[in-house]
Amino acid sequence: MARFIEGEEAHDRMDRLARKYLGSERFEWTMPVERRVAVIVHPTRVRHIVGVERFRPGGPVPAAS
């Protein structure tokens, strides 16, 4: 199942991702004629793969030196 978000809310979501991952207040590479669409996906099944690190809220933890 998926939900599509357009307009100002889609731009707001892109800005939040830019703050989190780029350290920028806004996503600055938007072209004037672009139409933003955010796709929210709700998985119906999740598969665990052995050997893959578990998800940690807040992002990855730096490796110890």
Image (cartoon, rainbow, N blue to C red):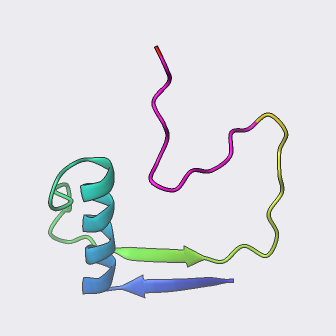
| In the image, residue 59 lies in the stretch drawn in magenta | yes
Q: Quadrant of residue 10?
A: bottom left
Question: Can the viewer see residue 45 in this picture?
Answer: yes
- Nearest the eye: 52 or 13: 52
Residue 40 in the image: x percent, y percent?
54, 77
Pick whichever, 54 or 45, lies toward us: 54
The count of marks equals 0
Is 23 rendered above or below residue 17?
above
Could you say which is closer to the camera, residue 44 or residue 59? Answer: 59
Judge whether residue 35 can be spotted in this image.
no
Q: Position of residue 6 (x, y in %)?
A: 36, 85
Dividing the picture into quadrants, the one containing residue 19 is bottom left
> Which residue sits at x=26%, y=70%?
34
Q: Residue at x 83, y 57 (%)?
A: 47
**In screen coordinates, is 39 left or right of 2?**
left
> Image height check: is 3 above or below 33?
below
Q: Is 56 placed left or right of 35 in the picture?
A: right
Point out the stretch of residues depicted in magenta: 52-64
What residue sits 30% from the left and 84% below the top? 9
> As drawn, which residue projects farthest toward the top?
65
Q: Which sits in the foreground, 3 or 16?
A: 16
Expressed as whole percent of the image width and height from the top left, the position of residue 20 reads 31, 55
Q: Main secondary structure of the magenta part?
A: loop
From the viewer's perspective, is residue 7 above or below residue 14? below
Looking at the image, which residue is at 26% across and 76% down?
12
The N terminus, quarter of image: bottom right
Residue 63: % across, % down: 50, 24
Q: Is residue 32 magenta?
A: no
Q: Find the residue positioned furthest to the front.
A: 64
